[in-house]
Image (tube, rainbow, N blue to C red):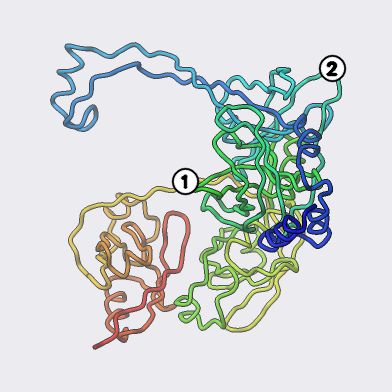
């Protein structure tokens, strides 16, 4: 290899963080000079997934510009009388994605969103062979799905790696079916770890600059040892060089449960937690902002039985440090229901350890709240609140009789920025219970300019803490 080329390679790898052995291998022009042998080895395990979903609807309809049916629109009857409704029809929608074979007997991993609502799933191998696939199980919380195809011969299966041992700068290889073009290979590095995209409680994505596009979803992300270390899942619209993959260590646990029982069960302690912000830390007299703040405890849940209370800060779960709020649900979910665990908390400035036997995570129930117009009886920090009357309870679906309900939040106010919203019920201010409007007024009147105000509010079936800093006097 010419000396200039050798110097160029050695310089480039400093930017991508290759190990010393791989640097020397590149510089000497060894097997890392081309990825072709590795691609040939891995490609047969990667499949294209074609789906068909069926939905029913009307091919066309006339809609009045003044609202429509159910909105008191006088013109809607006119349109129906003279034009009628178009007949309901079935619409077939095609979808494309990727997947990979992880066992010789035909089990395939892909994304849940690739096969969700599909009535027909076809798996196409690199050599063109096509199979009908059965959905064994799905897990929307992690966006993973397990498929099964029947083959008379053993199928080429991937090898799992260890995503826990990945380092930022490690080389990776993505193979998939972008835009339905068929097998396509891209390479890059791990750009970041532990990314949260706000998609759910279990976000823990690997970020890579290996090109990932629509159609790559469900495909494998390999290391240069030919092991799967991630499941390509998400992209940022309009972004370049930013793709996300589910770590294979998480995927292995989910897929094992789907294979054994067709569903995933997770450990549950029964708390509603939130981030410890600087304002909340000051309001609760905490030392620092680490941990997960317990905003509410589920009645009859494992945490309540163990003695966990609202206002506790969980800093360690079964030996794992909880640095940030998202760490807790991911850590708890990694244990099976029935597991006996230890939880270290901060309560009143002191550490305490509790023993909790995990329950099973129940199905989530969506909560809704409705806003009603009402006379403003108090306005502070951009809040409009009023007493909880029988009418208010009925309209908002409120069960509590104690506290005051927020009926309006001024746009751009401190309360709006902090996240308070109409329908929230204020239960406490600065740890003092708010029983009625008089309590609310007296407590707010006693608040000094520039002081943090720590609200405990009821939102749906949960309670959360919200801290707002009042304006200081000029």
Q: Nearest to the eye among marks 2 and 1: give it.
A: 2
Along the viewing direction, whichever of 45 and 314 lies nearer the viewer: 45
Q: Residues within 10 Å of mark 2 (few under 14, many from 20)?
A: few
Q: Which mark is residue 312?
A: none
Left or right, 470 with respect to 177, comes to: left
Quarter of the figure that contains the C terminus: bottom left
Instruction: State whether residue 66 is above or below residue 172.
Output: above
Front residue of this view, candidates 252 and 362: 252
Location of residue 173 in the rendering, given as x and y in whole percent from the top left corner: 70, 44
**Residue for point 46% across, 80% down:** 283
Question: In this rendering, would 442 be left or right of 159?
Answer: left
Give the mark, 2 or 1, whose residue is nearer the N terminus: 2
Q: Which mark is residue 366?
A: 1
Measured along the vertical axis of the image, is residue 273 above or below residue 52?
below
**Image quadrant assignment for residue 348:** bottom right
Please tell me which residue is depicted at 45% across the width and 45% down the height of the picture: 238
Q: Are marks 2 and 1 in contact (CB under 8 Å)?
A: no
**Which residue, given by chain and number where applicable, does mark 2 sit on?**
152
- Does residue 245 lie above or below 291 as drawn? above
Quadrant in the rendering for residue 45: top right
What is the C-alpha distance between the residues marked 2 and 1? 45 Å
The residue that appears at 23% across and 20% down in the rendered structure is: 62
Numbered disc total = 2
Q: What element carries label 1?
A: loop
- Front one among 91 and 171: 171
Say whether residue 50 is left or right of residue 423: right
Query: What SS does tag 2 mark?
Result: loop
- Give residue 143's position: percent from left, percent from top: 61, 41
Locate residue 121, reporting x and y percent.
63, 22
**Residue 196 on image: x %, y %:** 56, 56
């Amino acid at each position: 290899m010419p000396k200039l080329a050798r110097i160029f390679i050695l310089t480039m790898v400093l930017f991508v963080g290759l190990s010393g052995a791989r640097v020397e291998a590149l510089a000497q022009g060894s097997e890392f000079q081309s990825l072709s042998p590795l691609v040939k080895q891995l490609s047969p395990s990667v499949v294209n997934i074609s789906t068909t979903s069926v939905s029913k609807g009307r091919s066309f309809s006339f809609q009045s510009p003044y609202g429509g049916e159910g909105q008191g629109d006088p013109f809607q009857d006119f349109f129906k009388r003279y034009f009628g409704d178009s007949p309901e029809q079935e619409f077939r929608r095609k979808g494309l994605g990727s997947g990979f074979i992880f066992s010789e007997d035909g089990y395939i991993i892909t994304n849940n969103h690739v096969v969700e609502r599909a009535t027909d799933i076809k798996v196409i191998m690199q050599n063109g062979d096509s199979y009908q696939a059965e959905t064994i199980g799905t897990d929307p919380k992690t966006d993973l799905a397990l498929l099964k195809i029947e083959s008379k011969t053993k199928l080429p299966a991937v090898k799992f790696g260890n995503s826990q041992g990945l380092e930022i700068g490690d080389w990776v290889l993505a193979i998939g079916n972008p835009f339905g073009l068929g097998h396509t290979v891209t390479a890059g590095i791990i750009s970041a770890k532990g990314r949260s995209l706000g998609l759910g409680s279990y976000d823990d994505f690997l970020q890579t600059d290996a090109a990932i596009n629509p159609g790559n979803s469900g495909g494998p992300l390999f290391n240069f040892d030919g092991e799967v270390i991630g499941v390509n899942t998400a992209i940022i619209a309009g972004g370049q060089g930013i793709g996300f993959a589910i770590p294979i260590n998480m995927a292995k646990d989910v897929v094992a449960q789907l294979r054994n029982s067709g569903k995933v069960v997770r450990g549950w302690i029964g708390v509603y937690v939130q981030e410890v912000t600087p304002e909340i830390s000051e309001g609760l007299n905490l030392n620092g902002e680490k941990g997960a703040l317990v905003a509410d405890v589920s009645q009859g849940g494992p945490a309540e039985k163990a003695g966990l209370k609202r206002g506790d800060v969980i800093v360690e779960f079964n030996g794992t440090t909880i640095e940030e709020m998202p760490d807790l649900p991911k850590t708890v979910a990694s244990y099976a229901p029935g597991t006996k665990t230890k939880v270290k908390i901060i309560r009143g400035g002191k550490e305490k350890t509790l023993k909790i036997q995990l329950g099973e995570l129940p199905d989530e129930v969506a909560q809704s709240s409705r806003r009603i117009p009402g006379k403003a009886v108090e306005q502070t920090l951009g809040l409009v609140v009023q007493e909880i009357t029988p009418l208010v309870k009925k309209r908002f679906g409120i069960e509590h009789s104690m506290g005051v309900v927020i009926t309006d939040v001024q746009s751009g106010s401190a309360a709006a920025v902090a996240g308070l919203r109409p329908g929230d019920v204020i239960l406490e201010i600065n740890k003092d219970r708010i029983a009625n409007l008089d309590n609310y007024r007296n407590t707010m009147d006693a608040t000094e300019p520039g002081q943090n105000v720590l609200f405990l509010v009821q939102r749906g079936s949960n309670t959360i803490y919200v801290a707002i800093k009042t304006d200081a006097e000029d």
